[in-house]
Image (cartoon, rainbow, N blue to C red):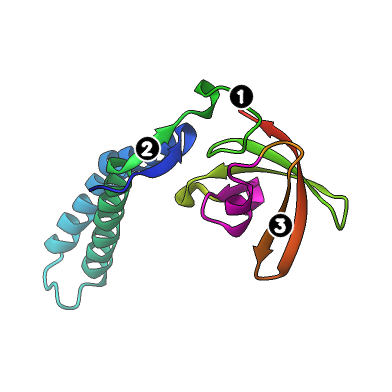
């Protein structure tokens, strides 16, 4: 049985764009660089050839990685789901830190999409796991490496 991996629509689109760039631009550029390096003769001591081959290995590995991720992705468009006030994958949740009175906003996304600087946290993170299934008004305790923190859910948005 294939395990489906949740992914947002923008996250899947970014992966498709990267895949297209790698296949249409990078692959041909590297093939051309290898061909040019081969024309320079002895491949044992040809740094350009070895660098191009290394790049080729990286690009081919990344292509396989992206294709694999997209093949098992369960793409979820949170805008198409009914707004119930519950925290589910893909929503943006506003939480109030009960110790500091700071309000934080995070979108709960797939592991590959997580970017704390962009306020996107992985569905597998301790904070997201404590929030999933809860609703506005609930108080949750997030157990993180820095200790336990209490948050109150003050908003759930399908953006």
From the top left corner, tell me how far across and down residue 19 is, in percent: 32, 42
Residue positioned 84% across, 53% down in the render: 98
Q: Residue furthest bottom?
A: 45
**Label 2, label 3: how far apart the Cα atoms are:** 28 Å
Q: Residues within 10 Å of mark 2 (few under 14, many from 20)?
A: some
Q: Is residue 10 magenta?
A: no
Disc 3 is placed on an element classified as: strand
- Residue at 73% of width from left, 65% of height from top? 148
Say which element carries label 2. Answer: strand
Relative to 87, 24 lies left or right: left
Q: Earlier in the sequence, mark 1 or mark 3?
A: 1
Q: Out of 118 and 83, give the one closest to the viewer.
A: 83
Q: Out of 37 and 22, give the one closest to the viewer.
A: 22
Magenta-colored span? 116-134
Q: Is residue 118 magenta?
A: yes
What is the quadrant of residue 18 in the picture? Answer: top left
Specify whether 18 is left or right of 64.
Answer: right
Residue underneath mark 2: 74
Tag 3 residue: 141
- Which quarter of the figure has residue 144? bottom right
Tell me the SS state at disc 1.
loop
Distance of label 1 from label 3 (alpha carbons): 24 Å
Which of the two discs, 2 and 3, sits closer to the camera? Answer: 3
Location of residue 131 with respect to 137 vertically, above or below:
below
Residue under numbered circle 1:
83
Q: Position of residue 116 (x, y in %)?
A: 63, 53
């Amino acid at each position: 049985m294939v395990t489906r991996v949740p992914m947002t629509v923008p996250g899947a689109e970014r992966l498709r764009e990267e895949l297209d760039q790698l296949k249409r631009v990078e692959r041909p550029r590297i093939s051309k660089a290898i061909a040019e390096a081969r024309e320079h003769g002895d491949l044992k001591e040809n740094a350009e050839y070895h660098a191009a081959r290394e790049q080729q290995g990286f690009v081919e590995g990344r292509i396989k990685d992206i294709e694999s991720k997209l093949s098992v992705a369960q793409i979820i468009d949170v805008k198409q789901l009914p707004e119930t006030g519950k925290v589910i994958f893909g929503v943006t949740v506003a939480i109030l830190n009960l110790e500091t009175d700071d309000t934080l906003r995070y979108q709960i996304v797939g592991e590959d999409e997580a970017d704390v600087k962009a306020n996107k946290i992985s569905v597998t993170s301790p904070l997201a796991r404590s929030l999933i299934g809860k609703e506005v008004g609930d108080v949750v305790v997030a157990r993180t490496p820095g200790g336990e923190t209490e948050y109150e859910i003050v908003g759930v948005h399908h953006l």
